Amino acid sequence: MTTGKGAHSAQVAGDGSPSAAERGSSPGPDLDERLDALEEDAARLGQLEGMVRQAARLVKDSQELVYFHKIRDEGFHRAANEVIESGRTLLEKDRLWTLWQAAKAVARLGLPAVEVGSFKGGSAYFLATAFLAAVGKELPVHVVDTFEGHPASKIGKDEPKQVVGQFSRTSYDDVREYLSHFAKIKVHKGEFTTVVSKLKDERYGLAHIDVDLRESTLDCLEFFGPRMERGGVIVLDDFQAAKCPGVEAAAEDYLAGDDSFQSWIPRTEQLVLIKVA
Protein backbone atom coordinates (compact mmCIF):
# COMPACT_ATOMS: atom_id res chain seq x y z
CA MET A 1 0.00 0.00 0.00
CA THR A 2 1.28 3.39 -0.87
CA THR A 3 1.05 5.89 2.01
CA GLY A 4 1.99 9.44 2.93
CA LYS A 5 2.73 12.37 0.67
CA GLY A 6 3.40 10.30 -2.40
CA ALA A 7 -0.02 8.71 -2.31
CA HIS A 8 -1.72 12.12 -2.05
CA SER A 9 0.09 13.53 -5.07
CA ALA A 10 -0.80 10.52 -7.22
CA GLN A 11 -4.57 10.67 -6.65
CA VAL A 12 -6.73 10.60 -9.76
CA ALA A 13 -10.44 10.75 -10.30
CA GLY A 14 -12.36 7.56 -10.78
CA ASP A 15 -12.53 8.06 -14.55
CA GLY A 16 -8.80 8.50 -14.86
CA SER A 17 -8.91 12.33 -15.22
CA PRO A 18 -6.77 14.59 -12.99
CA SER A 19 -8.22 15.25 -9.57
CA ALA A 20 -9.23 18.68 -8.29
CA ALA A 21 -6.04 18.77 -6.24
CA GLU A 22 -3.97 18.16 -9.35
CA ARG A 23 -5.81 20.79 -11.34
CA GLY A 24 -5.10 23.37 -8.64
CA SER A 25 -6.96 26.72 -8.44
CA SER A 26 -6.56 27.89 -12.06
CA PRO A 27 -9.96 29.00 -13.36
CA GLY A 28 -9.35 27.56 -16.80
CA PRO A 29 -10.53 28.79 -20.18
CA ASP A 30 -14.18 27.84 -19.64
CA LEU A 31 -14.55 30.12 -16.62
CA ASP A 32 -12.76 32.97 -18.41
CA GLU A 33 -15.14 32.65 -21.33
CA ARG A 34 -18.12 32.69 -18.98
CA LEU A 35 -16.85 35.80 -17.23
CA ASP A 36 -16.34 37.52 -20.59
CA ALA A 37 -19.88 36.57 -21.59
CA LEU A 38 -21.27 37.94 -18.31
CA GLU A 39 -19.45 41.23 -18.83
CA GLU A 40 -20.90 41.50 -22.34
CA ASP A 41 -24.39 40.74 -20.99
CA ALA A 42 -23.98 43.41 -18.29
CA ALA A 43 -22.91 45.96 -20.89
CA ARG A 44 -25.90 45.13 -23.07
CA LEU A 45 -28.19 45.36 -20.02
CA GLY A 46 -26.79 48.79 -19.20
CA GLN A 47 -27.43 49.94 -22.75
CA LEU A 48 -30.96 48.53 -22.58
CA GLU A 49 -31.67 50.35 -19.31
CA GLY A 50 -30.46 53.57 -20.89
CA MET A 51 -32.76 53.00 -23.86
CA VAL A 52 -35.71 52.32 -21.54
CA ARG A 53 -35.06 55.55 -19.63
CA GLN A 54 -34.77 57.47 -22.88
CA ALA A 55 -38.02 55.93 -24.17
CA ALA A 56 -39.81 56.81 -20.92
CA ARG A 57 -38.54 60.36 -21.22
CA LEU A 58 -39.75 60.61 -24.81
CA VAL A 59 -43.19 59.33 -23.77
CA LYS A 60 -43.36 61.89 -20.95
CA ASP A 61 -42.25 64.68 -23.29
CA SER A 62 -44.82 63.72 -25.91
CA GLN A 63 -47.59 63.56 -23.30
CA GLU A 64 -46.61 66.98 -21.98
CA LEU A 65 -46.47 68.36 -25.50
CA VAL A 66 -50.04 67.22 -26.15
CA TYR A 67 -51.24 68.40 -22.74
CA PHE A 68 -49.62 71.83 -22.81
CA HIS A 69 -50.68 72.37 -26.40
CA LYS A 70 -54.23 72.40 -25.07
CA ILE A 71 -53.47 75.13 -22.54
CA ARG A 72 -54.41 78.38 -24.23
CA ASP A 73 -52.96 80.69 -21.59
CA GLU A 74 -50.33 82.45 -23.66
CA GLY A 75 -49.11 84.39 -20.63
CA PHE A 76 -48.21 81.12 -18.96
CA HIS A 77 -46.35 79.82 -21.99
CA ARG A 78 -44.36 83.03 -22.38
CA ALA A 79 -43.42 83.18 -18.70
CA ALA A 80 -42.55 79.48 -18.47
CA ASN A 81 -40.50 79.48 -21.65
CA GLU A 82 -38.61 82.55 -20.52
CA VAL A 83 -37.41 81.12 -17.20
CA ILE A 84 -36.74 77.65 -18.59
CA GLU A 85 -34.71 78.94 -21.52
CA SER A 86 -32.78 81.28 -19.25
CA GLY A 87 -31.51 78.31 -17.23
CA ARG A 88 -32.72 80.00 -14.06
CA THR A 89 -34.99 77.18 -12.90
CA LEU A 90 -34.88 73.41 -12.70
CA LEU A 91 -38.68 73.22 -12.78
CA GLU A 92 -40.29 72.01 -15.96
CA LYS A 93 -43.58 73.16 -17.41
CA ASP A 94 -45.72 70.71 -15.47
CA ARG A 95 -44.58 72.06 -12.09
CA LEU A 96 -44.62 75.65 -13.33
CA TRP A 97 -48.23 75.16 -14.40
CA THR A 98 -49.12 74.18 -10.82
CA LEU A 99 -47.44 77.36 -9.55
CA TRP A 100 -49.14 79.50 -12.20
CA GLN A 101 -52.60 78.21 -11.22
CA ALA A 102 -51.86 78.65 -7.52
CA ALA A 103 -50.64 82.23 -8.03
CA LYS A 104 -53.68 83.17 -10.09
CA ALA A 105 -56.01 81.59 -7.51
CA VAL A 106 -54.58 83.52 -4.55
CA ALA A 107 -53.75 86.82 -6.26
CA ARG A 108 -57.21 88.14 -5.38
CA LEU A 109 -56.20 87.99 -1.70
CA GLY A 110 -53.61 90.68 -2.36
CA LEU A 111 -51.25 89.16 0.21
CA PRO A 112 -47.49 88.56 0.13
CA ALA A 113 -46.03 85.34 -1.22
CA VAL A 114 -42.83 83.57 -0.23
CA GLU A 115 -40.46 81.14 -1.89
CA VAL A 116 -37.97 79.18 0.18
CA GLY A 117 -35.34 77.48 -1.93
CA SER A 118 -35.04 79.66 -5.01
CA PHE A 119 -31.67 78.53 -6.42
CA LYS A 120 -31.08 80.92 -9.35
CA GLY A 121 -34.33 82.83 -8.95
CA GLY A 122 -36.25 81.54 -11.96
CA SER A 123 -39.35 80.30 -10.16
CA ALA A 124 -39.52 83.47 -8.04
CA TYR A 125 -39.41 85.55 -11.24
CA PHE A 126 -42.11 83.31 -12.65
CA LEU A 127 -44.37 83.76 -9.60
CA ALA A 128 -44.01 87.54 -9.72
CA THR A 129 -44.93 87.42 -13.41
CA ALA A 130 -47.98 85.28 -12.63
CA PHE A 131 -49.25 87.79 -10.05
CA LEU A 132 -48.75 90.62 -12.50
CA ALA A 133 -50.71 88.71 -15.15
CA ALA A 134 -53.50 87.87 -12.70
CA VAL A 135 -54.20 91.25 -11.12
CA GLY A 136 -52.27 93.73 -13.25
CA LYS A 137 -49.92 94.76 -10.46
CA GLU A 138 -47.06 93.38 -8.42
CA LEU A 139 -47.56 91.64 -5.10
CA PRO A 140 -44.84 91.37 -2.47
CA VAL A 141 -42.70 88.24 -2.85
CA HIS A 142 -40.11 87.14 -0.30
CA VAL A 143 -37.29 84.96 -1.64
CA VAL A 144 -35.24 82.93 0.83
CA ASP A 145 -32.16 80.83 0.06
CA THR A 146 -28.81 80.03 1.59
CA PHE A 147 -27.20 80.62 -1.84
CA GLU A 148 -24.61 78.16 -0.57
CA GLY A 149 -26.51 74.91 -1.05
CA HIS A 150 -27.76 72.47 1.57
CA PRO A 151 -26.39 73.13 5.08
CA ALA A 152 -24.81 70.09 6.75
CA SER A 153 -26.86 70.61 9.92
CA LYS A 154 -30.13 70.06 8.04
CA ILE A 155 -29.38 66.81 6.19
CA GLY A 156 -30.80 63.79 7.99
CA LYS A 157 -29.43 60.25 8.15
CA ASP A 158 -32.34 59.03 6.02
CA GLU A 159 -31.49 61.41 3.18
CA PRO A 160 -28.46 59.76 1.55
CA LYS A 161 -28.99 61.42 -1.83
CA GLN A 162 -28.75 64.92 -0.37
CA VAL A 163 -25.28 66.44 -0.35
CA VAL A 164 -23.81 69.33 1.61
CA GLY A 165 -23.51 72.35 -0.67
CA GLN A 166 -25.86 70.93 -3.29
CA PHE A 167 -27.37 73.74 -5.42
CA SER A 168 -24.56 76.11 -4.48
CA ARG A 169 -23.89 77.22 -8.06
CA THR A 170 -25.69 80.50 -7.51
CA SER A 171 -25.15 83.73 -5.60
CA TYR A 172 -27.15 86.23 -3.62
CA ASP A 173 -25.91 89.20 -5.67
CA ASP A 174 -26.67 87.53 -8.98
CA VAL A 175 -30.20 86.53 -7.99
CA ARG A 176 -30.97 89.91 -6.43
CA GLU A 177 -29.86 91.62 -9.66
CA TYR A 178 -31.94 89.21 -11.76
CA LEU A 179 -35.05 89.82 -9.66
CA SER A 180 -34.56 93.61 -9.48
CA HIS A 181 -36.96 93.85 -12.41
CA PHE A 182 -39.70 93.56 -9.77
CA ALA A 183 -39.85 96.33 -7.20
CA LYS A 184 -41.72 94.26 -4.60
CA ILE A 185 -39.41 91.26 -4.46
CA LYS A 186 -37.17 91.03 -1.39
CA VAL A 187 -34.30 88.54 -1.37
CA HIS A 188 -33.14 87.12 1.97
CA LYS A 189 -29.84 85.25 2.31
CA GLY A 190 -29.46 82.53 4.91
CA GLU A 191 -30.79 79.26 6.23
CA PHE A 192 -34.54 79.66 6.74
CA THR A 193 -34.65 79.59 10.54
CA THR A 194 -32.04 82.36 10.68
CA VAL A 195 -34.01 84.79 8.51
CA VAL A 196 -37.61 84.27 9.65
CA SER A 197 -37.36 87.33 11.86
CA LYS A 198 -37.18 89.39 8.65
CA LEU A 199 -40.51 88.03 7.44
CA LYS A 200 -42.74 90.47 9.27
CA ASP A 201 -45.92 89.83 7.30
CA GLU A 202 -48.49 88.17 9.50
CA ARG A 203 -50.52 86.55 6.71
CA TYR A 204 -49.49 84.99 3.41
CA GLY A 205 -51.39 84.05 0.30
CA LEU A 206 -48.87 81.67 -1.26
CA ALA A 207 -45.81 79.76 -0.09
CA HIS A 208 -43.63 77.79 -2.49
CA ILE A 209 -41.33 75.49 -0.54
CA ASP A 210 -38.53 73.79 -2.45
CA VAL A 211 -35.88 72.78 0.07
CA ASP A 212 -35.63 68.99 -0.47
CA LEU A 213 -34.86 68.19 3.18
CA ARG A 214 -37.14 66.89 5.94
CA GLU A 215 -36.08 69.26 8.71
CA SER A 216 -36.05 72.32 6.48
CA THR A 217 -39.46 71.45 5.00
CA LEU A 218 -40.91 70.99 8.46
CA ASP A 219 -39.41 74.30 9.62
CA CYS A 220 -41.19 76.06 6.74
CA LEU A 221 -44.53 74.32 7.30
CA GLU A 222 -44.51 75.08 11.01
CA PHE A 223 -43.83 78.76 10.31
CA PHE A 224 -46.10 79.39 7.34
CA GLY A 225 -48.91 76.95 8.09
CA PRO A 226 -50.47 79.09 10.84
CA ARG A 227 -49.77 82.28 8.86
CA MET A 228 -51.58 81.28 5.67
CA GLU A 229 -54.77 83.20 4.93
CA ARG A 230 -57.89 81.16 4.41
CA GLY A 231 -57.88 80.28 0.71
CA GLY A 232 -54.09 80.56 0.62
CA VAL A 233 -51.94 77.85 -0.94
CA ILE A 234 -48.73 76.08 -0.02
CA VAL A 235 -46.93 74.22 -2.81
CA LEU A 236 -44.33 71.67 -1.72
CA ASP A 237 -41.86 70.67 -4.39
CA ASP A 238 -40.31 67.19 -4.73
CA PHE A 239 -43.18 65.53 -2.84
CA GLN A 240 -42.89 61.73 -3.19
CA ALA A 241 -39.70 62.17 -5.23
CA ALA A 242 -37.37 59.23 -4.65
CA LYS A 243 -34.38 61.50 -4.08
CA CYS A 244 -36.21 63.59 -1.46
CA PRO A 245 -38.01 61.23 0.96
CA GLY A 246 -37.83 63.85 3.68
CA VAL A 247 -40.35 66.13 1.98
CA GLU A 248 -43.20 63.63 2.23
CA ALA A 249 -42.17 62.66 5.76
CA ALA A 250 -42.22 66.31 6.86
CA ALA A 251 -45.64 66.87 5.28
CA GLU A 252 -47.05 63.84 7.06
CA ASP A 253 -45.59 65.00 10.38
CA TYR A 254 -47.02 68.48 10.02
CA LEU A 255 -50.46 67.56 8.69
CA ALA A 256 -50.93 65.03 11.50
CA GLY A 257 -51.28 68.03 13.82
CA ASP A 258 -52.97 70.56 11.52
CA ASP A 259 -56.31 69.76 9.92
CA SER A 260 -56.84 73.24 8.46
CA PHE A 261 -55.53 72.26 5.01
CA GLN A 262 -57.02 70.40 2.09
CA SER A 263 -54.41 68.31 0.30
CA TRP A 264 -54.06 67.77 -3.44
CA ILE A 265 -51.41 65.58 -5.09
CA PRO A 266 -50.98 66.35 -8.81
CA ARG A 267 -48.89 64.01 -10.95
CA THR A 268 -45.92 66.38 -10.77
CA GLU A 269 -44.10 65.38 -7.56
CA GLN A 270 -45.71 68.32 -5.78
CA LEU A 271 -48.12 68.61 -2.88
CA VAL A 272 -50.69 71.40 -2.93
CA LEU A 273 -52.13 72.46 0.44
CA ILE A 274 -55.14 74.77 0.47
CA LYS A 275 -56.00 76.57 3.69
CA VAL A 276 -59.68 75.91 4.37
CA ALA A 277 -60.05 76.78 8.04
Image (spheres, rainbow, N blue to C red):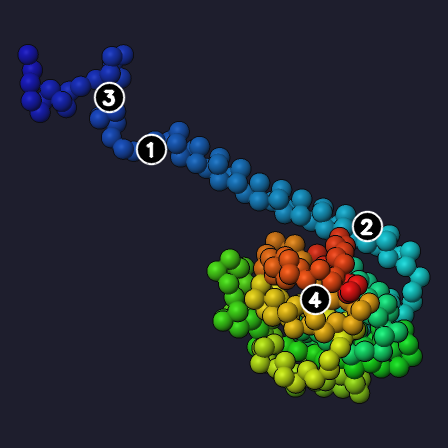
Q: Please tell me whether mark 4 or mark 3 is closer to you in this view.
A: 4
Q: Please tell me whether mark 2 or mark 3 is closer to you in this view.
A: 2
Report x, y in % for residue 256.
64, 57
Residue at numbered disc 3:
19
Residue at numbered disc 1:
27
Give the alpha-carbon distance from disc 4 to disc 2, as whole Å.
19 Å
Could you say which quadrant of the image residue 133 lies in? bottom right
Give the alpha-carbon distance from disc 1 to disc 2, as whole Å.
52 Å
The numbered mark, 1 or 3, whose residue comes first in the sequence reads: 3
Which element carries disc 1, helix, strand or loop? loop
Q: Please tell me whether mark 1 or mark 2 is closer to you in this view.
A: 2
The amino acid beneath tag 1 is Pro
Give the alpha-carbon distance from disc 4 to disc 1, as whole Å.
51 Å
Which element carries disc 3, helix, strand or loop? loop
The numbered mark, 1 or 2, whose residue comes first in the sequence reads: 1
Could you say which quadrant of the image residue 103 lies in? bottom right
Residue ID at (90%, 59%) = 71
Residue ID at (65%, 73%) = 223
Residue at numbered disc 4:
90
Q: Are marks 1 and 2 in contact (CB under 8 Å)?
A: no
Residue 2 in sight from this viewpoint: yes
The numbered mark, 4 or 1, whose residue comes first in the sequence reads: 1
Give the alpha-carbon distance from disc 1 to disc 3, as whole Å.
14 Å
Q: Which image quadrant: the C terminus? A: bottom right
Q: Are marks 4 and 1 in contact (CB under 8 Å)?
A: no
Report x, y in % for residue 150.
56, 71
Residue 88 in sight from this viewpoint: no
Side (left or right) of 153 relative to 121: left
The amino acid beneath tag 3 is Ser
Disc ID at residue 92: none
